[in-house]
Every structure is written in C-alpha cells, then in structure tokens.
Image (cartoon, grey):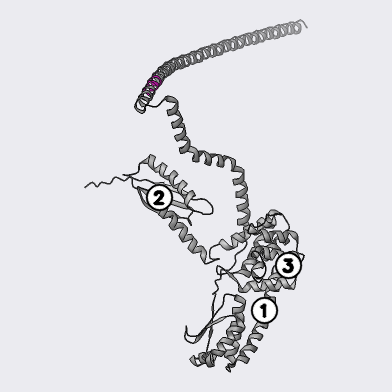
Amino acid sequence: MAVATDQNIIAAVAFSSGAIVAYAVAKWRESTLQQLHERRLRTEVELARREGAAAAAEAQAVADAEKAEARLAAEAARRDAAQAAQDRSRAAAEAERIRQESLRLAGLPAEELRRAAIQAMRADLGEEARRLREEVMGRAEDEVGEEARRRLVAAMQRLTPQVAQEASAVTVGIPGDEMKGRLIGREGRNIRTFEQLTGATLLIDETPDAVLVSCFDPVRREIARLALRAVIADGRVSPGLIEACVASARGEVDASVRKLGAAAVRDLGLPPMDPAVEELLGRLNFRLSANQNTLAHSVEVARLCAMLASELGIDPTPAKRAGLLHDLGKAIEAEAEGSHALAGAALLRRLGEDPRVVNAVAAHHREVDPESVYAPLVMVADAASGSRPGARSSSLEGLIRRQRGLEELALGFPGVSEAFALQAGRELRVIVQPQRVDDAAAAELARALRIKVEAALSFPGTVRIVVIRETRYLDEAR
C-alpha cells in the first residue's frame, strides 16, 4: 500500500515537472517570436523612411532643375522683349523718318496726305468690305438656299424625262415627180387653194420625192400635213378635194387636241378640267419652246411642282395644277392682250380656277407678285425643266458662249498664258507666266478677275477662279 502511494507521488511530481517545462518552453517560444516580429517591423519602418527620404531628395532635385530652366527662360524672354522694344523703336524712328522725307518730297501737309492715303485705301478695299459684309449677312440665306437645293435635287432625281427634239418643219413623201405637177395645178390653182385654206406654205422643188410643209403655227402645220397626205393618197388633185381633205384634217386635229389634253390631265391624276382648258392643253403639243415640246414641258413642270410640294409638306394638287397650266396662254390666240402668263391667268380666273393656281400662273415670269408658296414652286420647276441638259437646243450654245467668254476675259490680262473654263463654266482656271507674275501679283490677278467677271458677264451661280503659277527647274545628271 505504501509502495503504491509513493509511485503516485512520484508520477504526480513527474507530471508537474513536465507541465512546468512545457509552459516554460511555450513562454520562451512566444517571447522569441515577439522579438522577431518587432525586429522585422523596425526593419520595414527603417526601409520606408529611407525610401521616402530618397523620393524627397529626387523631387527636390527635379524642382531645382525646373527652377533653373525657368530662370533661363525668363532671362531669354526679357532679352527678347528688350530686343523687340529696340526693334519697334527703330521701326518707329524709321517710319517717322520716311514720313518726314515723304512730306518733304511731296510738299503736302500731313493732314492732306493722310486723307489721300485713306481715300486710296477705301477705293482699293471697298469691294472687299462689301463682299465681307454680304458674306456675313448672307449666311442665313446660304443655309436656306442649301436646303432649297437639297429639296429640289431630291425631287428632280425622281423624275427622268425623255429628251426629245422635234423639227419645226415637216416633209411629206410623194410617189414621184409627176405628183408635184398635180399639186401645183393649172396656173398654180391647186397650191394656192391649199395654202389659202391651211395657212401653210408648200415647198415643192426643194427636195426630190418629198414636199416640205412650212408654217409658223404648229397646229396649222399639222392640219396641212394630214390634208396633204390625204390628197396624195387620193391622187385626184383638185380644189374641191383639197377643201374636203383640209376640213377632214382640221376635224381630226381638233379631236386629237382634245384627246391629248384630256390624256395629260388624266396621266397626272387630276380630275377632268373645263373642255376649253383641255383643248388648249392639247394645242400645246404642237408648240415648241427652243425645240422643247410645250405640252411635255408643262407635264414635267407639273410633276416637279407636285414632288417639291410634297417635300415641303404642302398640298401637291394645287402645285400640280399650276405647273400643268402655267404655259396655257401660249395656246391662246393673239387677240388676247398681255403676255402668255397673264393671258392664261385671265382665262383661268374667268373659268373659276383656284386663286392660288391663277396667281402662280400669272407670277411664274415675275410679272405680278406671288401671293402663295405655289408661285415660287412653279418658277423653280419651270427653270429646272428648261435648263436641264438636252432639254432645249439653246442650252449647249449658251454653255459654249459662257465658257468662251470666261476664257477670253482671262486671256486679256497681262501675264496670262492659258485659261480654261471647267465644270460647265463654274470654274475658271488661269495659268500665268512665272517670269512676269510673282506670287503677290497672282493673288491680285485672282481678285481683279473676280471683279471683272462680276462686272462683264451675266451668269447663274458662282464662278470659282483659280490662278496657277508654277516654276520648274530641270536638270539631268549623266
């Protein structure tokens, strides 16, 4: 029993000793780790302090360098300012010397010389000031014009009419020269009867196997052509036959005229018009304006007016009616007083046409003031239809005259070697002789050309003037 107790005591002592040793080891380890952690923290803090000091030293060095550069730049600026002040002083002194010398040489008082210089400068630069004022004040108009051109081009691109040139005189074939004698008749009675009834002239001896029918009135010319074909087809030429054929041809033309007018109205999608109006529209088919068929031109203007009105967001029907009827007065006989625009408008007013359409017809040549937006639409569409390439025979001749006039005008200036009108006369390219015209003179030549073109020529749109001065030095190495 005593032995067991001693063993327990020994075991307890041994356990206590182990626990004490383990605790001591744990405390030592904890103390050692704490010392290592503190030492590492001190090391990191020291490194951070050294890095901060190095960065501060570097920033100080950069600042010192920039201050030195700033001082150098300030000194250079002060030197430049002093030099500039000296230059201005010398220039002012030289200008005063030149002025005094000019006064001495001219013998004029200073105030009078000043007025003369101002007057010369005003005369030289007055045109430039006018152009600058117009350019500044016209910016809004340019924007409006650009929008108008956009809408006009958008409408014209939708319309691709056929270009057709019609002859002003017609020929009728005959079976042989024997028929010429029959047409003339005994002592010329047949040809006299024909010409009296139709108002046309027969030119029999001009071409073989053909008779030329000539008349200024296109309707009468068409009646004469149909009557002559009927007479030739019958062969028994006599005054009675001629009279019957002319009456038949006149009825045929009248019926054709009514059909053409009604067809034009129907093709445009308009309701039927007064029979007198449709007949006059049909007569326009036999009339030409610079070789452009007037009825086809009127239909084209009507379509353009309708498309422009649609682009502007207004009712296209009155615009279409005004475009179709704008040249109606050309088919009215000469007894009606006034121009064709006023005569057509007067007829439409009597027939109860829409006042907007009546005013657009009367105003399309600016003979009366426009009262609605439809009048400017008809003006624009009328000009576009007549001026498009190939519409009228006079367009090419006018273009050639315009380009030739521009080139001849430029060649009249000294030092100009060649001149070319490009882009349908919208650009004038001038080549000068470099030995006679320097750069300053070339700029003055462009200005003088612009003033001369504005004063001497009448043209739509603008002309861009380009003056080219080029000097080439060539050599060859062998």
Q: Secondary structure at mark 2?
A: strand
Q: CA distance from mark 1 to mark 2?
A: 56 Å
Residue 270 has which mark?
3
Q: Is the Cβ of the residue at disc 3 closer than 8 Å to that at disc 1?
A: no
* Side of 326 relative to 478 (left or right): right
Q: Is the Cβ of the residue at disc 3 closer than 8 Å to that at disc 2?
A: no
Q: Secondary structure at mark 3?
A: loop
Q: CA distance from mark 3 to mark 2?
A: 53 Å
Residue type (three-letter) at the residue carrying disc 3: Leu
Percent from the top left, x then y, of residue 429?
Answer: 42, 51
450 vs 18: above or below: below
Q: Which residues are magenta?
A: 86-94
Camera-nearest residue between 267 and 433: 433
The residue positioned 45% from the left and 26% from the top of the image is 111
Residue type (three-letter) at the residue carrying disc 1: Ser
- What crowding class fits label 1: few (fewer than 14 Cα within 10 Å), some (14-19), or many (20 or more)? some
